[in-house]
């Protein structure tokens, strides 16, 4: 009986010893991984991963840190302009976190380029870039760990909100100073001031109704086309389908838009406005009847054609909208 008891105690001691060794090995491996990630981050805020590094530091346990990864295609032959724009915003976000006083090893930022880690793209069944994924410290990524790029855009501020939601890490985005805007504004004010000084004896142009009307009209057209939304959200210029190569300039959702789409809407609104102006001039102008007829026909054509195209865009974004004009 004593022999069986001693044997059982011996077996329990072996299991306990093995479990202690396994725990120590796990802690040692985790410490080495964290140390390596910290070293890479000290050299560059966004760690570049290939297939081997991805499997070792992201997929393989143990891991007590989250990794936010941008899957991209930055090589020139890929001709992915959106990837370059998204990479700039991702770098801003990663730098803001790396040089923050609250920086810890809880979250790391990394990127996987298609030409350096195509096996990772295949592993994850990924066929488009750029794509942002969060790999949480515990468990597998969920649907919400995939960033909705087409809806939210890739501005660093939007990415920071998503990261905070997925990791509980608050990142204050700090952008490097950009002096282009103030310099351009200063140059514009200098030009205006110079013109005003040169014409200081004749400032009637400041009281010209047409000048102010055209200026106000341009401002309104820029605002209603969605330029401010672009500035805040930072959407891509257009979208290229990776399977067919087809380029879409109009976003299919009413919750988002492309930069090209705002330019198209701006052009169409300007054309409709020009048509209305021509119709007003045809009705009130003192020119001969022939020119007034030409202005009237041109105005009607502009309004009918471009308003119909505007409705077509509206129907494409708001599915089920029942009305159309000339074009469906």
Image (tube, rainbow, N blue to C red):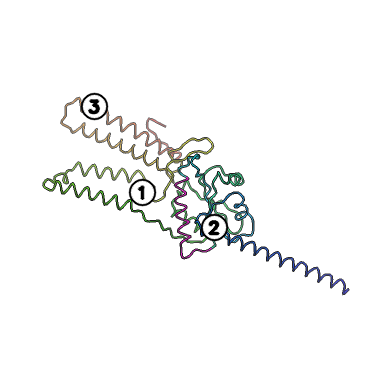
Q: Is residue 80 above or below residue 42?
A: above
Label 2 packing within 10 angstroms: few (<14), some (14-19), many (20+): some
The location of residue 209, given as percent across then percent down, is: 18, 43
Dominant secondary structure, magenta = helix
Q: Earlier in the sequence, mark 1 or mark 2?
A: 2
Q: Earlier in the sequence, mark 1 or mark 3?
A: 1
Q: Is residue 98 magenta?
A: yes
Q: Secondary structure at mark 3?
A: helix
Q: Which residues are magenta?
A: 83-104
Residue depth check, mark 1 versus mark 2: number of the one nearer the observer: 2
Tag on residue 40?
2
| 212 vs 41, nearest the viewer | 41
Tag on residue 55?
none
- Contact? badges 2 and 3 (CB < 8 Å): no
The location of residue 29, given as percent across then percent down, is: 64, 61
Q: Which residue is mark 3?
A: 294
Position of residue 199 in the picture relative to residue 324 (left or right): left
């Amino acid at each position: 009986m004593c022999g069986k008891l001693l044997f059982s105690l011996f077996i329990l001691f072996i299991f306990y010893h093995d479990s202690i060794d396994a725990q120590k090995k796990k802690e040692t491996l985790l410490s080495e991984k964290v140390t390596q990630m910290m070293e890479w981050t000290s050299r560059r805020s966004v760690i570049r991963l290939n297939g081997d590094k991805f499997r070792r530091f992201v997929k393989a346990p143990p891991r007590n840190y989250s990794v936010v990864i941008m899957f991209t295609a930055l090589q020139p032959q890929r001709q992915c302009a959106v990837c370059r724009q998204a990479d700039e915003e991702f770098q801003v976000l990663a730098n803001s976190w790396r040089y923050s006083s609250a920086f810890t090893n809880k979250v790391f930022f990394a990127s996987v380029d298609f030409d350096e880690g195509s096996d990772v793209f295949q592993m994850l069944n990924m066929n488009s870039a750029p794509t942002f994924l969060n790999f949480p410290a515990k468990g597998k990524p969920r649907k919400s760990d995939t960033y909705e790029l087409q809806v939210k855009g890739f501005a660093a501020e939007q990415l920071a909100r998503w990261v905070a939601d997925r990791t509980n890490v608050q990142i204050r985005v700090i952008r490097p100073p950009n002096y282009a805007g103030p310099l351009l504004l200063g140059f514009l004010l200098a030009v205006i001031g110079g013109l005003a000084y040169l014409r200081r004896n004749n400032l009637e142009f400041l009281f010209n109704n047409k000048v102010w009307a055209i200026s106000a009209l341009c401002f309104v057209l820029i605002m209603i086309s969605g330029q401010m939304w672009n500035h805040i959200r930072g959407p891509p210029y257009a979208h290229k389908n990776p399977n067919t190569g087809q380029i879409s300039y109009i976003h299919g959702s009413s919750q988002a838009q492309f930069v090209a789409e705002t330019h198209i809407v701006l052009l169409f609104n300007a054309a409709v406005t020009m048509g209305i102006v021509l119709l007003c001039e045809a009705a009130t102008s003192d020119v001969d009847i022939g020119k007034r007829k030409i202005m009237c026909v041109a105005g009607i054509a502009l309004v009918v054609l471009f308003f119909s195209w505007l409705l077509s865009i509206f129907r494409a974004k708001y599915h089920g909208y029942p009305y159309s004009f000339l074009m469906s």
